[in-house]
Amino acid sequence: MNPEQANALIHTRRSVFPKDYSGVPVDDQVVLQVLENANCAPTHKLTEPWRFIVYSGEGRKKLAQLQAAVYKEVTHSDGTFKEERYQNLLSKPMESSHIILVYMKRDEKKSIPEIEEIGAVFCAIQNMYLTATAYGLGCYLSTGGITYFEEAKAAFGLGPADRIIGFFHLGLPKESPRPRHRNPVYDKVMWIKE
C-alpha cells in the first residue's frame, strides 16, 4: 500500500447506521479479518485488552432479548423505563448482519492505567472501522442502550473489572456513505519549532 491509498482509506471511513444496511449478510470470513486486524492494535506491555463477542444470524435475537431484559430490569427499578426504547432494543439488532460486543478485559497484574487500556481497545476499533471500509462495508459503534449499565456486565459473563466499550454493527450499505465533514486540522494544531 502506498501513502495515497492509506490516506484515501482513512479519509473514506464513515459510520454507517444499521438502518442504512441492505440486509445482505456479510461473510463470516470478512468479519474474522475485521477481528484479526483489530488484534493488531497497539497495546502497552502487550496486555491486548480487547475482547469480542460476535452475534450473527439467530444470535442477534439472543442479543436483542438479553439487552432488552437488562434494560427493562434496570429502568423499571429506577423509574426511567421507556417502552419505545425497549422495543428498539428488541428490533434494531436485526438490521445488522453482525454485531460485535467490544469490551475491555483488565489485566490488573500489569498495573496499566485504565485509560491506556481503553485507548488500546479504541485503537482496535479504529482498525475494525478501516478494515470494514476497505471491504466496502458499513459499520457503526453504538454506545447507547445498555453499554454503560453495570448490570450488563454480568449478563454478558464479564467480570467486575471488565468494561463494555460498545456494540460494533456491520452490514452491507444500501448506498455509498455521505461525505464526511471535519473542521480543518489547522484549527486544532499548534506548531512549536524553536
Image (cartoon, grey):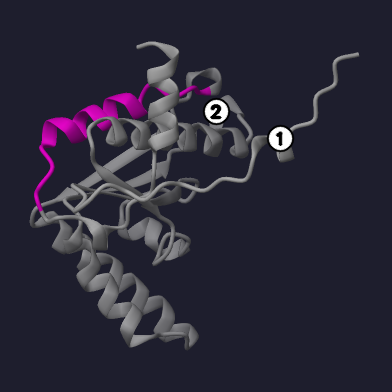
Quadrant of the rendered structure where residue 77 is?
bottom left
Question: Type of residue at label 1?
Answer: Tyr
Quadrant of the rendered structure where residue 69 is?
bottom left
Question: Type of residue at label 2?
Answer: Lys
Disc 2 target residue? 109
User: Disc 2 versus disc 1: distance between alpha carbons?
Assistant: 41 Å
Disc 1 target residue? 186
Whether residue 1 sits left or right of residue 117 in the image: it is left
Query: Which residue is rendered at x = 73% and y = 40% of the image?
Result: 187
- Image height of 121 relative to 90, above or below: above
Whether residue 56 sits left or right of residue 177 in the image: it is left
Residue segment shown in magenta: 24-43
Q: Closer to the camera: disc 2 or disc 1?
A: 1
- Image height of 104 relative to 63, above or below: above
Sequence-first disc among 2 and 1:
2
Q: Residues within 10 Å of mark 1 (few under 14, many from 20)?
A: few
Is there CB contact under 8 Å for labels 2 and 1? no
Whether residue 192 sits left or right of residue 35 in the image: it is right
Residue 185 among those drawn in magenta: no
* Nearest to the observer: residue 55 or residue 130: 130
In the rendered image, the residue lying farthest to the right is: 194
Question: Picture coordinates of residue 185 (x, y %)?
Answer: 65, 36
Residue 33 among those drawn in magenta: yes
The secondary structure type at the circle numbered 1 is helix
The secondary structure type at the circle numbered 2 is helix
Query: Which residue is rendered at x = 38% and y = 85% of the image?
Result: 82
Question: Picture coordinates of residue 40 (x, y %)?
Answer: 38, 21
In the rendered image, the residue lying farthest to the top is: 2
* Nearest to the observer: residue 97 or residue 76: 97
Question: Picture coordinates of residue 124 (x, y %)?
Answer: 42, 32
Whether residue 16 sits left or right of residue 137 in the image: it is right
